[in-house]
Amino acid sequence: MTITVLDREGVAAEEIPQAISLGQLHDAADQVNDELLPCRVNNSDLWFAESPQDVEFAKALCKDCPVQALCLDGALERREPWGVWGGELFLQGVVIPRKRPRGRPRKNEVAA
Ligand code: SF4
């Protein structure tokens, strides 16, 4: 099976073998204009942020990335220990829905 890099703004689509290393992701990203890669044009700390809001912002930015599918598949294969990859948040090698804020959870619900 192969994964195709999305064709964006005249950039030729390319088929990439399924076994994806970080090097292959970088090679695919290098074939795309840097301005189309959100993690290259924004503060890369967002992709490893402590703040849940910043993490959600990074996930949203990834959705428009031309190598998003390749990035996500590679992160799943490598079982990335943490950070946002391909529009998903990873923790200890698995995708989690959202980052919890720091601190203890409340014991009781607060009335609104
Ligand atoms: S999908 Fe997100 S983390 Fe992956 S290369 Fe694109 S912007 Fe960067």
Image: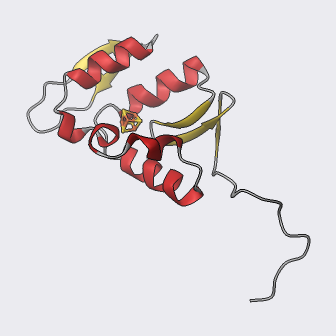
Position of 111 with respect to 107 (left or right) is left
Position of 94 with respect to 111 (left or right) is left
Identify the residue at the far left of this view: 10
Q: How many marks?
A: 0
Which residue is drawn at the image coordinates 16% and 32% (left, top)? 33
Q: Quadrant of the N terminus?
A: top left
Indicate the position of residue 39 as horizontal and vertical percent values: 35, 39
Nearest the viewer among 112 and 51 is: 51
State which quadrant residue 108 falls in.
bottom right
Which residue is drawn at the image coordinates 29% and 37% (left, top)? 40
Determine the quadrant in which ligand 1 lies: top left
Q: How is the image coloured?
A: secondary structure
Nearest the viewer among 2 and 62 is: 62
Indicate the position of residue 58 as horizontal and vertical percent values: 44, 49
Instruction: Give above or below for 3 relative to 104.
Output: above
Instruction: Give above or below for 110 relative to 26.
Output: below
Instruction: Give above or below for 98 relative to 88.
Output: below
Which residue is drawn at the image coordinates 19% and 40% (left, top)? 35
Indicate the position of residue 16 as horizontal and vertical percent values: 32, 14
Identify the residue at the far bottom of this view: 112
Q: Quadrant of the C terminus?
A: bottom right
Nearest the viewer among 41 and 37 is: 41
Indicate the position of residue 84 as horizontal and vertical percent values: 51, 39
Position of 111 with respect to 1 (left or right) is right
Which residue is drawn at the image coordinates 49% and 55% (left, top)? 54
